[in-house]
Image (cartoon, rainbow, N blue to C red):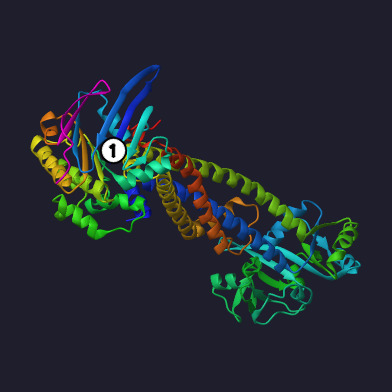
Amino acid sequence: MSIIEATGICKTYHRGREEVCALKGVDLSIEPGEFVSIVGPSGAGKTALMNILGCLDAPSCGTLMIDGVQVTGKGEAELVKIRRDHIGFVFQQFFLIPTLTVGENVGLPLIFSGIPYDRARIDSLLDKVGLSHRAGHLPGQLSGGEMQRVAIARALVNKPRILLADEPTGNLDSVTADGIYGLFDDLHRQGITVIVVTHNRELAQRAGRVITIRDGCVERECGYPHVSP
Amino acid sequence: MNLFSLALRNLQRRKGRTILTIIGVAIAVAILFSLLSFSAGYERELTKEMDSLGFHLLAVPKGCPYEATTLILHGGVIPKYLTTEDLARTRATEGVKTAAPVLLQQFVKDGTPHIVYGIEPDAMIPLKPAWKVNGRFFTANETHVMVIGSTLAEKENLVPGSVIPFGPAQEPFTVIGVLKPTGSEDDNFHFLPLADAQRVFSKEGFITAIAVRADDVKNIHDITVELEKVPDIQVVTMAQVTGTIMNLVGSARSLLFSVIVIAIVISAAGITNTLLMSVNERTREIGMMKAIGASGHHIGILLITETLLITLSGGTIGIIAAMAGSGIIETFVRGMVPYAPSGSFFSSDPLLIGGCLVFSIGLGLLCGLYPAWKSARLSPMEAIRGEWE
């Protein structure tokens, strides 16, 4: 069973009187443990698709199933639960809270999920992203790459099956970006479904499947569903 | 880590702004606490002072009765007198249990005004059960002796047995007793036998006022009516004095309440502005929190906790500041009110402290509600894009 099954997804925005069709009937099926890159030019509808797949936005038409659960039509309270239990988010701007330490930033989702604050789990995640020595530092003391690693650790703290990353290397230099993709690759190998939206076609090729979006439609797919070993 | 510690850390981001908002709340609560505290304390002390007077009504010369009464209570001198005939008629009035004549005079010594009370001990002492004397009280016929109030004794370094030059002729007078502290204006006065006071100040046959105690409070009205038939006499009951003073104080209190309302409105606008700015700056972060599992409820609680931390800190600081500065505030209030009882107005009633803290919480909830509601209902996607409005 696919972990994400999107059928006929379309999204229309209103910008003043203008109607913008960001997505025009996208069909997409992602298997558990896949590493997928979504690429395309600016305004192609990549982020709109990512927001819908992450239950941050509702499609104007079509249906979406996450881990066998019908998502379309559900209320915000249920969507919060789906996001919390199934999905980890990584953003281009990191969104770390400047007054919290690295360890506290990683543990932030635990406050909202009602899970007891698990220091050992936070330490293990920081170890996984290579930042165990930075647990007590504030975000302002970190480099861009380190901040994104903290954001990735935060996205994993609720043990999601899906990791969605929207332009995660957009603010990073090429060497650091390469390291972040290495980390995604590791997570994919551990069985997490990783979906990355990026402009960088070279890095996108490191995923098992590359989906190109143009003008709100899937233009082409390269590679095949390649699940983790 | 929990929502409380997250709220606390959020407030540390813009320390200056947070501190200024807390100061705004502290000022509003300090004014509120002082006003309520002094209002309660004033009424309590005024009632206590009126009760300690020991008489129900005062017969004063016709003229301005309330002015005369407050002057007499404070120890002032009025240039009009009753006579011993008036005293006799008062004593003969039905329902009068005690009628104690008083002659009030003032003299200046070393630049300080001194108040002299000429009294008949047999009539006045029963009206003053709170009077306890170190040494002894004088009898009606003694001369060149006096009893003084405790504050005066301390100020002038006088003890029973001290001999001081007294009056216009600087006659030697012996202090034969010092009143134990009463907490009233009596602590500042010289008390002399009435006849001797009349002699010293050349006011033979004259008295300033007559303190009257009725045999039953029900008879106060009848006594008043009867006494006012005497051409020289005007009667003021203590209830009228209390009521008049409270009315005058009420005007000052209304003015202060207007000030507090303005202070609270300004403070509330400041808190709401701080929160709205804070939410505005953190819109994308709120979107991130919603993406990683925060519900609108979590965001609302976070914002309300931040507001409550501001208002409760401000409230606590305000109450402590008001208590610490109560002496200065009391001096200021004393200058503003038409009659100030001698006891301390300040009241640190736990109920009042609790009430002011509850007010701080209410203020926080009121101010935090809109920003909390607004941020709670933001869609995560709009918030991540930074679309606040």
Q: Is residue B120 left or right of residue A32?
A: right
Q: Is residue A143 visible?
A: no
Q: Residue at x 46, y 59 (%)?
A: B320
**Residue placed most toward the observer, B30 or A203:** A203
Residue A221 is one of the magenta-drawn residues: yes
Viewer-closest of A186 and B261 = A186
Query: Relative to residue B190, is residue A27 depicted above or below?
Result: above
- Work out which quarter of the rendered image holds the N terminus of chain B and state it: bottom left
Decide which of B161, B254 is in the foreground and name it.
B254
Q: Measured along the vertical axis of the image, is residue B240 above or below residue B199?
A: above
Which percent across, then down, holds residue A88? 27, 44
Residue at the limit of the structure toward the front, as seen here: A1
With respect to residue B136, does A26 lie above or below? above
Instruction: Name which residue type carries label 1.
Output: Ile
Residue A95 location, x and y as percent?
Answer: 26, 41
* Residue span colored magenta: A208-229
Q: Chain of mark 1?
A: A
Give the residue number, with chain letter if any, for mark 1.
Answer: A4
Q: Can see residue B89?
A: yes
Q: Quadrant of residue A26?
A: top left
The outermost residue toward the left is A175
User: Magenta includes B361?
Assistant: no
Looking at the picture, tell me which residue is in the foreground, B107 or B202.
Answer: B107
Decide if residue A70 is on the left or right side of residue B126.
Answer: left
Q: Residue at x 42, y 38 (%)?
A: A74
